[in-house]
């Protein structure tokens, strides 16, 4: 169980003052029951071992479940694991041995945890769990202590979900299928009943995401009643999906959760989970790799809270809260409007006229930027909130041709887009440059413009496209406005990718030629062979074994090091030139020239 912080003195003072000045009674707690049955092989007696389950694992209309909900019963190595979810508070697990049993028997003691491992039980056991009754208070009550946060939340679309013009016009205010996601605690005790009886619970408020909070408001020093903070996408997915949307409203409810759940952002990479749990997990992998591969680590950095342990770091991928801030509405000035100045030369790059501010749907960062950016060093000193939201992670991480251990990371997309990475002049390899592609300057939303394409509903009962699968639409219709037609765009992509792919192969073949015919003898042995040009840990272009060790890397000429650096930057960009065709070609041509210089020696 996560440790709970002691309440601050200011909170206690506000709490005491509120009790003295309020006629509102303290809430009492009663129990709700949810039942789930499942059969198992017979084993004698019963015992329970509790473990923490930190994140919401199921979709619930309205966000955080207001009453206990069973989430799973399954075999584990040492018994049976029973999991449930619900609002903050203590839970009691019960079981009975068959449907014929007249009574339920408590299993273990009541606990703040939401999981139990039963090490022995009888066959065909049935389970249920009791927990705290949801006691809703409404956002106005939260404002007594959290006014600063509420003052920003009231400006979000969430807060107006009940009064939204489309929602009202479609009859949503009286539609029981719509109210769970447009009000607080609908269908639950003390939750929303109707507009006249409970107007203070209309709209999406604090308790939709944090759970019922009246008990906490009545006694903020009670650690068992502290509202939950959940970063898993299942919380947002309870409403931002199509599963719970009535057919008549499907055409204007995009499937945000379903698309995200099928994307690579959905989970932490398996190899990173192992790294997080390893001996260097806490000191190396969690604070470095975790900042872009783990939703919980990223959130901890953004909120300046302690970094999570390995289990927590592995639990959530790049979720909604990684890119969106439920508490804020930000308005970012579009940096692509007006005159853009080359930060290296001072010259004007483009003037495409003012297009005004970009409202970003509660995004944490803007959709476009042209400032060079590399994730390096300490997050608190390196983080730049003005950088493109995608570029926060999809950047080159500050690599150098001087690095010899491994190729640049597989994330140089932003730096390739704006042309700020790699070596263009072998005689001045450290001189900064800025050669943005047309996609960087003329697509108003940069990455989002192509990778998050949306489309309206195709007809009644059909959801629109949400753009949260982050994949390019292969029909290229979005490109037609600049390229004349979708066919022109498609043909251009084929041409550019063919050209860059061919040049990648040419540079790679030249490097292999150097390794085979010009490399120092110690690098040309059977130990390395065609990998003699590679990094100590070779990239994907040279499978089959290690490259020259750290000491032997000193025998590789500087030209070869710069060439392989350029090669892998273009290769790891993975667009094969589409992000910035001319710049990609320039990096590869420079690489080829450098290798040819060494081949002539």
Image (cartoon, rainbow, N blue to C red):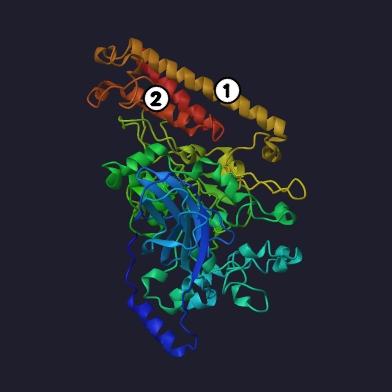
Question: Which labelled disc corresponds to residue 563?
Answer: 2
Q: Mark 1, residues whose alpha carbon is within 10 Å: few (<14), some, or many (≥20)?
A: some
* Residue tagged 1: 498
Quadrant holding the C terminus: top left
> SS class of the residue under badge 2?
helix
Q: Position of residue 238 (x, y in %)?
A: 57, 56
> SS class of the residue under badge 1?
helix
Question: Which labelled disc corresponds to residue 397?
Answer: none
Q: Nearer the viewer, residue 143 or 349?
A: 143
Q: Seen in the image, is 191 located left or right of residue 544? A: right
Q: Nearer the viewer, residue 103 or 433?
A: 103
Q: Position of residue 276 (x, y in %)?
A: 33, 43
Q: CA distance from mark 1 to mark 2?
A: 20 Å
Q: Single out the mark in the foreground, 1 or 2.
A: 1
Q: Are marks 1 and 2 in contact (CB under 8 Å)?
A: no
Name which residue lies at 59% across and 27% down. Answer: 496
């Amino acid at each position: 169980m996560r440790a709970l912080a002691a309440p601050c003195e200011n909170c206690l003072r506000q709490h005491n003052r509120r009790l003295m000045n309020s006629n509102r009674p303290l809430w009492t707690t009663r129990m709700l029951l949810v039942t789930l049955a499942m059969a198992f092989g017979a084993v004698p007696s019963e015992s329970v071992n509790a473990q923490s389950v930190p994140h919401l694992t199921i979709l619930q209309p309205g966000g955080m479940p207001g009453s206990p909900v069973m989430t799973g019963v399954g075999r584990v190595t040492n018994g049976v694991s029973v999991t449930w979810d619900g609002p903050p508070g203590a839970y009691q697990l019960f079981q009975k041995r068959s449907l014929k049993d007249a009574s339920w028997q408590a299993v273990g003691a009541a606990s703040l945890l939401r999981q139990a491992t039963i090490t022995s039980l009888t066959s065909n056991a049935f389970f249920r769990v009791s927990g705290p009754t949801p006691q809703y208070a409404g956002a106005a009550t939260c404002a007594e202590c959290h006014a600063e946060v509420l003052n920003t939340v009231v400006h979000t679309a969430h807060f107006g979900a009940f009064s939204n013009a489309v929602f009202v016009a479609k009859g949503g205010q009286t539609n029981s299928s719509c109210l769970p996601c447009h009000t607080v605690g609908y269908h639950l005790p003390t939750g929303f009943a109707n507009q006249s009886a409970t107007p203070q619970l209309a709209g999406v408020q604090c308790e939709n995401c944090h759970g019922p909070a009246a008990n906490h408001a009545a006694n903020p020093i009670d650690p068992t009643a502290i509202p939950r903070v959940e970063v898993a996408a299942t919380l947002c997915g309870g409403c931002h999906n199509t599963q719970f949307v009535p057919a008549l409203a499907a055409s204007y409810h995009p499937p945000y959760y379903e698309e995200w759940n099928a994307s690579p952002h959905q989970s932490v990479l398996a190899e990173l989970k192992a790294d997080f749990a390893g001996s260097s997990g806490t000191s190396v992998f969690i604070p470095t790799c975790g900042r872009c591969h783990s939703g919980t680590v990223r959130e901890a950095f953004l909120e300046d809270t302690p970094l999570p342990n390995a289990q927590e770091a592995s639990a959530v991928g790049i979720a909604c809260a990684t890119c969106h801030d439920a508490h804020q509405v930000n308005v970012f000035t579009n940096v692509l409007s007006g005159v853009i100045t080359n930060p290296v030369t001072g010259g004007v790059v483009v003037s495409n006229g003012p297009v005004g501010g970009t409202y970003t749907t509660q995004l944490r960062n803007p959709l476009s930027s042209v400032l060079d950016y590399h994730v390096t060093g300490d997050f608190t000193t390196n983080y730049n909130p003005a950088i493109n939201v995608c570029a926060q992670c999809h950047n080159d991480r500050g690599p150098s041709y001087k690095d010899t251990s491994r190729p640049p990371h597989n994330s140089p997309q932003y730096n390739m887009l704006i042309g700020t990475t790699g070596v263009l002049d072998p005689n001045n390899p450290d001189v900064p440059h800025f050669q943005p592609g047309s996609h960087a300057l003329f697509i108003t939303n940069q990455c989002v413009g192509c990778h998050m394409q949306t489309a309206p509903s195709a007809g009644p009962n059909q959801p629109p496209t949400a753009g949260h699968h982050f994949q390019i639409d292969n029909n290229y219709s979005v490109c037609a406005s600049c390229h004349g037609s979708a066919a022109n765009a498609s043909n251009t992509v084929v041409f550019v990718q063919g050209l860059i792919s061919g040049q990648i192969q040419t540079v790679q073949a030249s490097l292999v030629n150097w390794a085979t015919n010009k490399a120092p003898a110690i690098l040309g042995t059977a130990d390395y062979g065609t990998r003699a040009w590679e990094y100590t840990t070779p990239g994907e272009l040279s499978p089959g074994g290690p490259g020259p060790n750290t000491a032997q890397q000193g025998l590789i000429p500087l030209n070869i090091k710069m060439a392989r650096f350029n090669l892998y930057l273009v290769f790891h960009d993975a667009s094969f030139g589409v992000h910035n065709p001319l710049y990609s070609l320039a990096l590869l041509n420079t690489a080829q020239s450098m290798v040819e210089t060494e081949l002539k020696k």
